[in-house]
Amino acid sequence: MDSQRFMGVYIHWPFCASKCPYCDFNSHVRERVDEDAWGAAYEQAIDHYRALIPDREVVSVFFGGGTPSLMKPQTVERILQKIRSSWPSGQDPEVTLEANPTSVDMGKFRDFRSAGVNRVSLGIQALDDESLKFLGREHNSAEALRAIEVAQSCFERMSFDLIYARPGQTSDLWGRELEQALALARGHLSLYQLTIERNTPFYMRHSRGEFAIPDEVEGAELYLLTQDITERAGLPAYEVSNHAAPGQECLHNLIYWKYSDYIGIGPGAHGRFLLDGRKVATRDHSAPEIWLERIGERGCGAHPHEEISHAAQMEEALMVGFRLNSGVGFKDFQERFGTHPLELIHRGNLALAVEEGWVNLSDTRLSLTREGLLRLNSLTAFLLLGVASAQKKTAGQSTSPAV
Ligand SMILES: C[S@@+](CC[C@H](N)C(=O)[O-])C[C@H]1O[C@@H](n2cnc3c(N)ncnc32)[C@H](O)[C@@H]1O
Ligand code: SF4
């Protein structure tokens, strides 16, 4: 991906009908949302970025949340029109919208398609009523199946999310649920292990011992089983939690993991893009009302953007690249950053990781094995130990807030 020219656009819609007890995403429940004001604010923010980086081509747009399927299709259309009139887009940009499988949201699918959405990602989470109730979802299993059907009749491309490693979920139970999901899937699935996040009702209930989730060993078993079953079904993982048939990978997600450019608009959204040859990071204010106010005052909801030092860019690119099953290609990395990635990796730790079977190392690339991806965070820290952070410290002296 030519990061000098192509970019993705992420639009964050921060509202949900209710808050799921496991979720720590930036999502809020409000009695009333003034969609006209929100539509106008997204348009203004797009103007801001268009003035900042005019010479771009948009290859993907992703409406994430929160629950963007709560938006009126007219609001989605308005934002997409503004994006189209601000930058040229390739022949067939990918336009994804995250949707919840309630009847109200489903009723809008055709209008979302007319508005320009060509891919939906459904938050199915589980295929049985008891689990959906435990997860505090607003839909039941019949609605989940119906939503998959409606989405498939409206969109050429669709994916759905499931959360596994739920309380009491044995390999046998998960294996059966996953087979059922694969029979329903069309080319793409996101499969997340349930994590207990701080500041969520699940965190409290879990720490009070009200429920237990599979331990590390059981979780690892479920993860490995997931890889076996999806691979056999022709939907292998291309990233830790994302599975696709060849060619059906989500382009927008690949932009993140290949460290290409994207702008992020909406409360709490992040962006990473080249500005006058320097890579900058943006982070929008996360409180919805403050974000809206900021846009009104300054036309932009982001904190001042920060330049990312060359060393930090290389470290970030490795960190996201390790998530991909294809890993990090040496030639691309060297061409982009002028440094061979192996120079940034702790030699002794790498040798150990290869010996343990956590890393595949060839003449052209480095990737984590399944066993390596299982311990992604600790292994990343282990591989990048010392070398990159030492460089960062030196280069950090030249890091300054850009604007
Ligand atoms: C932004 S959320 C989803 C969008 C949509 N609002 C929904 O819930 O269907 C993206 C996905 O992250 C996953 N997720 C969120 N919190 C999680 C957690 N604590 N553990 C595992 N997966 C989680 C869910 O599968 C969810 O669909
Ligand atoms: S999981 Fe989705 S629907 Fe539930 S609170 Fe989080 S963003 Fe909203």
Image: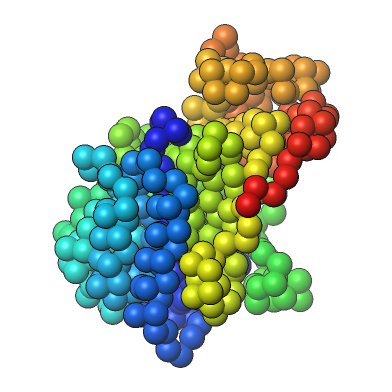
Q: Residue furthest bottom?
A: 31
Camera-side residue of 90 and 112: 90
Camera-side residue of 120 and 402: 402
Residue in the picture at 48% in, 67% down: 299
Residue 391 place in picture, x, y as percent: 79, 28
Residue in the picture at 41% in, 66% down: 44
Residue 283 place in picture, x, y as percent: 59, 58
Q: Is residue 135 visible?
A: no
Residue in the picture at 37% in, 66% down: 43
Along the horizontal axis of the image, is 214 left or right of 387?
Answer: left
Residue 330 versus residue 138 in the image, above or below: above
Camera-side residue of 267 and 342: 267
Camera-side residue of 297 and 104: 297
> Can you tell which quarter of the image residue 284 is in?
bottom right
Q: Is residue 258 visible?
A: yes
Residue in the picture at 41% in, 42% down: 7
Q: Residue furthest top?
A: 363
Along the horizontal axis of the image, is 141 left or right of 220?
Answer: left
Residue 138 place in picture, x, y as percent: 42, 78
> Can you tell which quarter of the image residue 196 is in?
bottom right
Q: Quadrant of the N terminus?
A: top left
Colour scheme of the picture? rainbow
Count of labels shown? 0
Residue 158 place in picture, x, y as percent: 29, 53
Residue 350 versus residue 14 in the image, above or below: above
Residue 193 versus residue 29 in the image, above or below: above
